[in-house]
Amino acid sequence: MKNNIADLLKGVDGLVTLPHVFIRINQLVEDPDSTMADIAKAVSQDPSFTVRMLRVANSPFYGFSSTIGTVDKAVAIIGTSQIRNLALSMSVASAFSGLPNHLVSMDNFWRHSLYCALIARILAKQARRCDPEAVFTAGLLHDIGELILFNRLPGPSHQALLLVLDQLDEMPIYQAEQQVIGIDHAEVGGELAKQWTLPPMLVECISCHHAIERAEHYPREVALVHLANSLAQMAEVDTLETADVTPVDPLAWEITGLDEDIIEAVIREAQAEIIETEKQFFGK
Amino acid sequence: MATPPRMPLVLPGFEQVRRSWNATHEAYAARLLPGEYYVTINDECVYTTLGSCISACIRDRVSGVGGMNHFMLPASADANSWKAANLSAATRYGNFAMEHLINVILKNGGKRQNLEAKLFGGGRIMENMSDIGMRNIIFVRDYLKTEAIKVVSEDVGDVFPRMVVYFPVTGKVRVKRLRSLHNNTIVEEESRYITTVAKEPVRSDIELF
C-alpha cells in the first residue's frame, strides 16, 4: 500500500502548528531588509518565550562568559539565524503535543530526539566546517515524521514496529515502514519541514537521515545527523555495541572525516548533558 | 548465498513454534512468543523479546539439550501473596512454565545434575507501573534455588526491553537492549498474553520427575 504523503500532511493541518513567534522570526531571518532590532522585537512580543530563551542563552549550553540580560543582547550575541534555531528547538515539542499517539510516549520520543541533537552538536564541533547549533536543531527534528505516521496510520505503524521486533537481525524502523506502509518517517518529516518553509538544511537532514547518499546540498550536516541518530540509540540503551542499533553508513564517517574511535567519549558526554538539556528545552 | 541446510526435526509438541533460517548466525532460529517455550537437541537458536516477562534458558551442559521459556506471573489480588503461599495461582503458573521446560529437557536426555540456567528479562519498562518485572525475577531465582539448578549468568531488571538469542547446544547467549521506541508495543503484547493466562484455570496435571 502506497500512501500519499500530501494526504497524510493534510490530515495533521491545524493539529501541529509552530507558534507564531517562531513563524515571525523565520520570516524575518529570511527577509534581507529586516534588522536585528526587528527580530528582537518579534521575540519580545512573546513574554514566556523571551524568559525561556534568556534562560537557555545563559545556560552552560552556550557557555557565554557574560550574562545576557536583554533580548537585544541575546540576538546580538547569539546571532539572528541562531535565534531562529533556538526558537524552533524550543517550540517543536509543544507544537507536536496536539498530535498524540499510542505507540510511543512523548517523553521517550523527545529523549531520543534530544540525544540525537546533543550528539549531532558534539560531532559537528569535532568535524568543523558546519554550524553546531543548526545541526543540533536538525537532530532534534530528525524524527518528526514518526509522530505523523504514528498518529495518522497507527495500525500500519504498529505492524511496522512488530516487524522490527520479529527480526533476529537488526531491522531499522524506516525499513519496516517502507515494507509495511510504502513510505518512511524520514520522507514524511522532510515534507512537513518543507511545508513549514524551514531552512533547506533542516529539510535535507530530516528527509535524508536514513539515506545520506541522497543529500544534495548538505551532505556534511546530513551525515552528522545520520551518525548522531545511531549514537543516540546507543546512548539511550547505554551500549557501545554498534551492532545493537540502526547501522551506520560508512559513507557518513568518510564525509565527516570523523573516526569511530570517538564513539565512547561522545556517548558519555551526551549522557552527562541529557538531563540538564531536557530541563532547558522541554521545561522538565 | 548458500542454500540453507534442511531444517532440523522439531521435538514433538513444538511444531507450532515458528522457525526460520538466519544467515548471520548460520542457524535455524525459533521465535518464541509470550507464554511459549521451546526445547531442542539440535544446533539451532531460540530467540524472543522481553519487557517485564522473564526467560529462563536451561541446558544440560554435557549433552547440550536445552531450551528457553518466556513467561510472566499473572498479577494476583494481593501483590505479595506469592511470597506467603506457594499455592497462589500466580506461583502455580510460574511453576508450570518452569517445570514444562525442565521436564522436556529431562525427557530428551538431559540429566538433572548437569543442568545450568541463564536468566533474562524482568525489565521495568514503564515508569509508572508497579515493578512486575521484579516479581518475575524473584520468582524464577527462588524456583531455581529450590530445584538446585545453578544460574550461571543473568541480565535482568533495569529499564530496558531486551532481545535474547540462545544457543542451547553451546550455551552461548546474545542479549540486545531495545530502544524505548518499542516499549509500548512490547507492553501491549505482554498484557494481551497475561490477560489470556489469567483467564485460564491453572491445570494441575504437571508430571513431576
Image (cartoon, coloured by chain):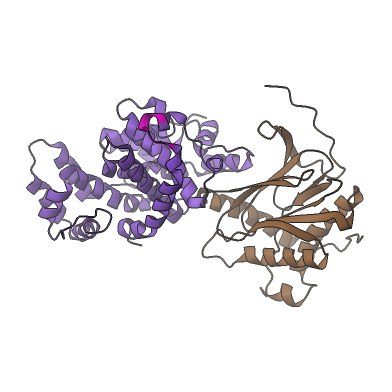
Whether residue A141 can be seen here: no
Name the colour assigned to chain B in the rendering. Answer: brown
- When the figure is inspected, residue A222 is found, relative to residue B187, above or below; the finding is above
Instruction: Single out the residue that lies furthest toward the bottom.
Output: B84
Say which quarter of the image contains residue B64: top right
Q: In this view, does A27 lie to the left or right of B44?
A: left
Question: Which chain corresponds to the colour purple?
Answer: A
Residue A219: where, in percent of width, then height?
34, 29
- Residue in the image at 37% along x and 32% along y: A257
Residues in magenta?
A254-259
Q: Is residue A110 magenta?
A: no
Q: Which quadrant: the C terminus of chain A? A: bottom left
- Residue in the image at 59% along x and 55% along y: B187
- Residue in the image at 42% along x and 48% along y: A265
Q: Is residue A258 magenta?
A: yes
Q: In this view, does B195 lie to the left or right of A272?
A: right
Residue B131: where, in percent of width, then height?
60, 66
Q: Which of A38 and A280 is in front in this view?
A: A280
Residue A227: where, in percent of width, then height?
42, 38
Whether residue A283 can be seen here: yes
- When the figure is inspected, residue A241 is found, relative to residue B126, above or below; the finding is above
Q: Is residue A100 left or right of residue B161?
A: left
Tally of marks:
0
Q: Which of A278 and A250 is in front in this view?
A: A250
- Residue in the image at 63% along x and 51% along y: B189
Q: In this view, does B103 lie to the left or right of A206?
A: right
Say which quarter of the image contains residue A275: bottom left
Instruction: Single out the residue that lies furthest toward the front.
Output: A261
Q: Which of A94 and B28 is in front in this view?
A: B28
Residue A199: where, in percent of width, then height?
25, 36
- When the figure is inspected, residue A48 is found, relative to residue A1, above or below; the finding is below
